[in-house]
Image (cartoon, rainbow, N blue to C red):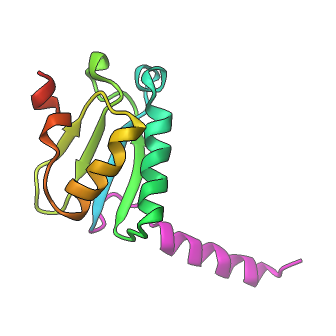
Amino acid sequence: MKSIQDLEAIRQKTLSEINLRNDRAGTRVVVGMGTCGISAGARPVMMEFVEEVNRRNLKDVMVTQTGCIGVCRLEPMVEVYMPGQEKVTYVLMTPEKVAKIVTDHIINGKVVTEYTIGAAE
C-alpha cells in the first residue's frame, strides 16, 4: 500500500498531465454529448478522437465533452478551438472522419470544409 504522500504525488502528477482547465494554451476538441448527440453516435466519435490524439501523442490537444450544441439534426457535432483562430464546427460526424480532421485541421491547420456546418447548410 502506498503512503498518503505517495498518493498525493501521483494525484498531482496526473492533474498536471491532464490539466482540464479550458483557458490553457493548445487545441480543444469539444464533442456534443447531449442526449441528441449520444443517440446520433457522439460517444464513438469522442472515443475515436481520444484514441487518435493518443496514437499521435498530441500533448497540446484536449478532448472534452459538452451538452447539446443546439442543432440536433446535425448531430453528432464537434467544435475545434485552436489558439488565435475562430471556432470550427464539424457536423454529422462519424468515427471514420476523425483521422482526417486530426491530420488536416489539428496538425496541419487546414479546415476540412466538407465536414463543417457551413457545408451542411
- Taking the spot 33% from the left edge, 33% from the top edge, the residue there is 93
| Left or right: residue 57 compared with residue 7 | left
Q: Nearer the viewer, residue 83 or 56?
A: 56
Question: What residue occupies the far right of the structure in this picture?
Answer: 1
Q: Is residue 115 above or below residue 103?
A: above
Q: What secondary structure characterizes most of the magenta part?
A: helix
Where the N terminus falls, by quadrant? bottom right
Q: Nearer the viewer, residue 31 or 95?
A: 95
Could you say where residue 13 lies in the image, as x and y percent from the top left?
57, 78
- Taking the spot 66% from the left edge, 77% from the top edge, the residue there is 10
Q: Nearer the viewer, residue 72 or 111?
A: 111
Could you say where residue 110 lies in the image, as x and y percent from the top left?
13, 55
Q: Which residues are magenta?
A: 1-25
Numbered disc total: 0
Q: Is residue 46 above or below residue 2?
A: above
- Taking the spot 38% from the left edge, 33% from the top edge, the residue there is 94
Assess whether residue 5 is covered by the magenta stretch.
yes
Could you say where residue 95 lies in the image, as x and y percent from the top left?
42, 39
In which image quadrant can residue 66 be found? top left
- Taking the spot 54% from the left edge, 70% from the top edge, the residue there is 15
Q: Is residue 17 above or below residue 55?
A: below
Question: What residue occupies the far top of the structure in this picture?
Answer: 73
Where the C terminus falls, by quadrant? top left
In which image quadrant can residue 24 be found? bottom left
Q: Nearer the viewer, residue 16 or 36?
A: 36
Assess whether residue 10 is covered by the magenta stretch.
yes
